[in-house]
Image: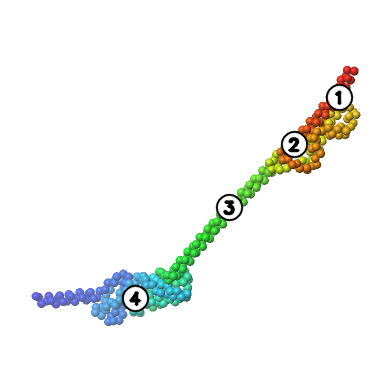
């Protein structure tokens, strides 16, 4: 073997070792802390770096990206002496690699213990209900305490979140019952509100219906009254225009009497006081016609003729002697028929008396004609 080859190989090996010990390549988002003879020298940045072989060495390699740390559930006592287990999630980032390596031995353990103590201080001043509803406040207070404490460690706490709050099992059952009762209460309230609104709407609809029906009835009554008023006005004008005799009006009154009791609801019928006057007017009407053919002596005694007519009249004249307003025991329809029959009897008797008067005057008239 060539004696020169061995030293060359040794020299090459030494050079490779020195190059490997001198060059350090740092990846992106990484930081290397370099110590020289056991003392912190500098922090290597990402890229190609050179160190002194044998004298310099890399002590710690740190990741400066934001990292997530999830702690185990920790028991915490609330102000109302209830034990709850709380899980937290921590978002942190190393801002000073030298401080993170040399100011604290284990920054993750330190952050975890600091989180536990801070949670106990914060939760200890709140009751269970406030703890469950004040997560944002708890997160803000935790972040403020942790950020202030970890600043000298070269670590920045970006965010702290409470992942879960687990109360005891009995408290969970009580909370479930409470929530169920609240839901039942809201359901009952909503149901009652629905029924209330339905009743209100129904009442409003009934009210509007009654109002419209009343308005319709009012308009119908007004139109009917206007029609009846116009009809009465026309009849009144026609009577006055034709100068009707009161005797004719009395006769028409007797004709309308049977129509007064056509209603089925009438249980008794009262004969009005004007019936006597009407019958008497009809009687005098036909008596006046007969008096036109009588001698002056008979015509001069109308009271005696009327008295004889009243004495000779059948039982039907008893209707003229009834007091006004006297009720009959017959029903309405029978009373109306009875009055009509009595009025017809009176008229028939008056006609008969007139015919008799004409017959008694006929022979003297013929004798006087032949003698002349």
**Residue at the disc numbered 3:** 202
User: What x and y, as percent, mark residue 218?
Assistant: 67, 46
Q: Nearer the viewer, mark 1 or mark 4?
A: 1
Could you tell me if the residues under marks 1 and 4 are in contact, i.e. CB atoms within 8 Å?
no
311 or 222, which lies in front?
311
Label 4 – label 3 distance at C-alpha: 77 Å
Position of 348 relative to 321 (above/below): above
Label 3 – label 1 distance at C-alpha: 84 Å
Q: Quadrant of the C terminus?
A: top right
One can see residue 212 in this view: yes
Label 1 – label 2 distance at C-alpha: 35 Å
**Residue at the disc numbered 2:** 338
Q: Quadrant of the N terminus?
A: bottom left
122 or 311, which lies in front?
311
User: What x and y, as percent, mark residue 295?
Assistant: 89, 27
The residue sitting at 88% across, 30% down in the picture is 299
The residue sitting at 59% across, 51% down in the picture is 205
The residue sitting at 34% across, 77% down in the picture is 106
């Amino acid at each position: 073997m060539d004696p020169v080859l061995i030293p060359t190989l040794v020299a090459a090996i030494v050079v490779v070792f020195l190059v490997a010990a001198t060059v350090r390549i740092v990846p992106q988002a990484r930081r290397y802390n370099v110590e020289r003879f056991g003392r912190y020298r500098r922090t290597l940045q990402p890229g190609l770096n050179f160190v002194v072989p044998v004298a310099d060495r890399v002590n710690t390699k740190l990741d400066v990206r934001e990292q997530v740390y999830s702690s185990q559930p920790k028991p915490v006592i609330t102000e109302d002496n209830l034990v709850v287990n709380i899980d937290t999630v921590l978002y942190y980032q190393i801002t000073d690699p030298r401080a993170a390596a040399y100011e604290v031995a284990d920054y993750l353990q330190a952050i975890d213990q600091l989180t536990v103590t801070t949670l106990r201080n914060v939760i200890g001043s709140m009751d269970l209900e406030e703890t469950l509803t004040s997560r944002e406040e708890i997160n803000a207070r935790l972040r403020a305490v942790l950020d202030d404490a970890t600043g000298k460690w070269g670590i920045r706490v970006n965010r702290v979140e409470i992942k879960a709050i687990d109360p005891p099992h009995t408290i969970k059952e009580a909370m479930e019952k409470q929530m169920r009762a609240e839901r039942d209460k809201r359901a009952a309230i909503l149901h009652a509100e629905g029924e209330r609104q339905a009743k209100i709407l129904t009442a409003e609809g009934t009210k509007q219906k009654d109002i419209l029906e009343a308005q319709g009835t009012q308009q119908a009554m007004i139109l009917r009254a206007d029609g009846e008023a116009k009809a009465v006005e026309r009849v009144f004008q026609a009577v006055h225009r034709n100068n009707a005799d009161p005797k004719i009006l009395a006769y028409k009154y007797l004709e309308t009497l049977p129509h007064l009791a056509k209603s089925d609801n009438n249980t008794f019928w009262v004969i009005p006081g004007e019936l006597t006057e009407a019958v008497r007017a009809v009687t005098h009407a036909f008596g006046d016609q007969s008096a036109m053919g009588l001698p002056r002596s008979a015509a001069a005694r109308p009271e005696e003729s009327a008295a004889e007519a009243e004495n000779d009249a059948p039982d039907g004249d008893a209707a003229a002697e009834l007091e006004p307003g006297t009720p009959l025991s017959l029903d309405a329809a029978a009373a109306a028929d009875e009055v009509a029959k009595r009025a017809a009897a009176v008229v028939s008797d008056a006609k008969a008396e007139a015919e008799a008067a004409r017959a008694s005057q006929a022979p003297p008239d013929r004798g006087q004609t032949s003698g002349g």
